[in-house]
Image: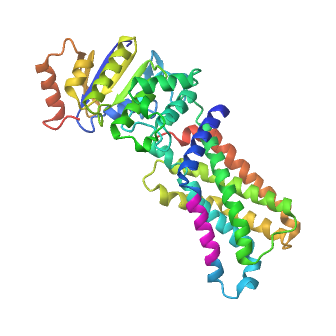
Amino acid sequence: MPGHCLALFGANGAGKTSLLSLVALQRVPSAGSLRLFGGEAAVDDLALRRRLGYLGHEPGVFLGLTGYENLLLYARLYGLTDAKERALGELRRVGLAPFRHTLVRSYSAGMRQRLGLARTLMHRPELLLLDEPHQSLDRRGQDLLDRLVAEHCGAGGAALLATHETERALGLATDVMVLSRGRIVYLATAAETTRATFEKVLSEALGGGELC
Amino acid sequence: MLKAAVWLFWKDLSLELRGRELLLPAAVFGLIIAMLYGFAFDGGQQVLRPMFPGLLWLGIFFSSFLAVGRAFGVEAEAGQQLLMAPIDRGAIFLAKLALNILLTLVLTAVLTPAFALLLGAPLPHATLLFLWTLMLGVVGFAAAGSAMGALTAQTRLRELLLPAVLLPFTSPLLLAAVSATSALYGKSPAQLGSWLWLMAVFDGIFILVPLLLFEYLTEV
């Protein structure tokens, strides 16, 4: 739903990444169907792909290109008319403008993640899909990520976020979902989710295991 | 689709020109093969000259394996993000095909005179037909390599799997290329046309079929 940010929690193998990659149209559902934006979703629907922005475990950038070249390539593949300006603007937004002509191979893991975030946001997707996006980022990077996601949702976009960072996700999310073995075991708005309820549900879902 | 293919080709070419990770090792490997042939076959150039077509094409194929086989490595490095772009996935195949044709052409341009020199075989008099034979062989190998490279790109044993899949598939092309080149040296020249046709058909199949099916080839 526009303006909503859904935080996704669950143990290892609960199905968070599978869910995100299904919504990202990277997989065909083995059973059932996938509905997005009120309609049936097909993996080869180019118009639908344009409405999604996905940041997975990898930042999805080419190490042998510079940061600017990476964004320029994606801007052109997304058919953005102001590709050069948009690429430069996004680099500024994530604080990488001074390193725009440096090969990504020389970037730190955190810088690559910032670049991945810029790539994901550049075409102004309606639905952001973020799979553990806080990983590799330092505190400032994580703050930046949270701010950009909040701006995105504040501007009417939606986000689906799977993360290790429980505190950050709860601060950011409008809705909370807990998965266990591929099934939804908890779904509520953040406002109606008390800390005690959440921890109880999560603890049951994890079976005493570790959150991831 | 063509516009996207051009941008993706630009990306692949930029990566290769900067890294030279594909062409240089493949060219060195091809030259080493040529030298080893010279050492391995006793009897010198008299013995090697009649075998020139076969040895040349084996050299081109084996060294091209190194380049073509690793061409999808950059996509594996960048994860699945490229597949999410709102472009016809055939554009990814076209870009990779163009890169592989270019790499294999450059390798062929380096290896053909080197093999001729080291094996003591003069190049055929019918230069245009020889160039046409080389071109058909290069395009066919690059097309099959691009298709199989896409198929095996996401597999764990990609480096092992690709040659195991690509060699059997390209063996008709290898046979036709060697036979056509032999025909240019006067061995059964009447069959030259048939071999060239066979190569052209092989090229057509391995360009058109993957282009149409690439969406499915890249589905996880």
The residue furthest front is A98
Q: What residue span does the magenta drawing correspond to?
A: B24-36
Residue shown at 74% from the left, 72% from the top: B116
Relative to A206, residue B21 above or below: below
Magenta residue check for B25: yes
Q: Where residue B138 sits in the image (x, y, percent)?
A: 70, 56
Q: Is residue A75 left or right of residue B60?
A: left
Percent x, y of residue B179: 77, 68
Q: Is residue B11 left or right of residue A24?
A: right
Q: Classify residue A185 by image quadrant.
A: top left
Q: Foreground residue, B59 or B24?
A: B24
Which quadrant holds the N terminus of chain A? Answer: top left
Query: Could you say which quadrant of the image residue A111 lies in?
Result: top left
Q: Residue furthest left?
A: A196
In the picture, measured across the screen, residue B182 lies left or right of residue B215, that is right
Please identify the dominant SS of the magenta region. Answer: helix
- Position of B96 compared to B154: left or right? right
Asked whether residue A33 appears in the rendered view, the answer is no
Q: Measured from the top left, where is residue A108 in percent x and y?
A: 35, 41
Q: Nearer the viewer, residue B198 or A49?
A: A49
Seen from this angle, which residue lies furthest bottom?
A: B43
Report if residue B32 is visible in the image.
yes
Which quadrant would the C terminus of chain A be assigned to in this image? Answer: top left
Percent x, y of residue B59: 65, 68
**B8 inside magenta stretch:** no
Q: Residue at x 42, y 31 (%)?
A: A98
